[in-house]
Image (cartoon, rainbow, N blue to C red):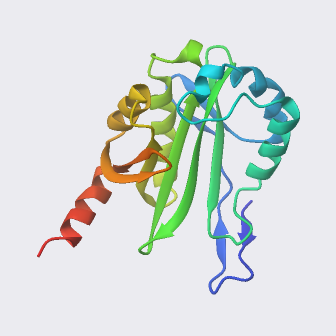
């Protein structure tokens, strides 16, 4: 099922529903409010917020957040919200999430992506595998360019972005460095040639 959006937009946009994704070790389940109860403990480690700010959410906060995010798009239809809960296939236990906010940029779809994996499951390639699975799914739906905002001291997320084929740019926002997929960097370089 797709969700038509954007009655106030000049062109109506219909974003596809988010599907489940399976990788070698991970299952990516489309986010729903029902995930809040299991995820509150996954997101309880204060160290997860060292570079992003904030604090572990309470169950009621997470339920509200997931209700809003699972709509799948912004109110004006300009953004497509793609959110997945990452589970390990061998145990079906949730370990984190991956997400993408997709927008049209210069006539093409670009996704601003993020990943969060609980500390007990970090350092085993789970974030890279889950994010790569998400990117493959997004590519199958027309997304060609990817960006991520990463704190300059967050070495683990920088390694994930690098493994995903992204490189840091000179752009910063709220103290985070914008990383872009190499195809986007090449296009920007070509635009600035004399």
Q: Nearer the viewer, residue 101 or 176?
A: 176
Res 19 seen here: no
Above or below, 170 against 51 in this view is below
Provide residue 70's location: percent of width, then percent of height: 76, 49
Provide residue 36's location: percent of width, then percent of height: 81, 32
Left or right for 3, reference 103: right
Q: Quadrant of the N terminus?
A: bottom right
Left or right for 163, reference 148: left
**Measuring 84% from the left and 35% from the top, which residue is drawn there?**
34
Left or right for 117, reference 125: right
Provide residue 92's location: percent of width, then percent of height: 69, 20
**Measuring 51% from the left and 47% from the top, which residue is drawn there?**
113
Toward the left, the furthest residue is: 194
Q: Nearer the viewer, residue 136 or 125?
A: 125
Toward the right, the furthest residue is: 60
**Measuring 63% from the left and 60% from the top, which residue is drawn there?**
80
Left or right for 166, reference 131: left
Above or below, 107 against 97 in this view is below
**Measuring 65% from the left and 45% from the top, which residue is drawn there?**
83
Q: Nearer the viewer, residue 133 or 177?
A: 177
Above or below, 89 against 28 in this view is above
Toward the front, the furthest residue is: 175
> Where is residue 55, by image quadrant?
top right
Above or below, 91 against 105 in this view is above
Res 152 seen here: yes
Q: Quadrant of the C terminus?
A: bottom left
């Amino acid at each position: 099922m797709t969700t038509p959006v954007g009655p106030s937009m000049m062109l109506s946009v219909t974003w596809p529903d988010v599907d489940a994704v399976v990788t070698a070790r991970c299952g990516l389940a489309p986010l729903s409010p029902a995930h809040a109860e299991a995820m509150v403990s996954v997101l309880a480690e204060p160290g997860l917020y060292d570079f992003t700010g904030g604090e572990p959410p309470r169950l009621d906060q997470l339920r509200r957040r997931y209700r809003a995010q699972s709509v799948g798009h912004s109110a004006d239809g300009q953004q497509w919200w793609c959110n997945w809960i990452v589970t390990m296939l061998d145990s079906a236990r949730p370990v984190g999430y991956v997400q993408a906010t997709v927008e049209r940029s210069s006539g093409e779809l670009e996704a601003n992506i993020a990943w969060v994996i609980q500390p007990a499951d970090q350092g085993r390639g789970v974030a890279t595998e889950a994010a790569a699975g998400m990117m493959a799914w997004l590519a199958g739906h027309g997304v060609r360019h990817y960006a991520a905002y990463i704190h300059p001291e967050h070495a683990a997320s920088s390694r994930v972005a690098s493994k995903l084929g992204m490189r840091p740019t000179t752009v910063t926002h709220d103290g985070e460095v914008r990383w872009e997929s190499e195809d986007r960097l090449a296009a920007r370089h070509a635009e600035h040639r004399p």
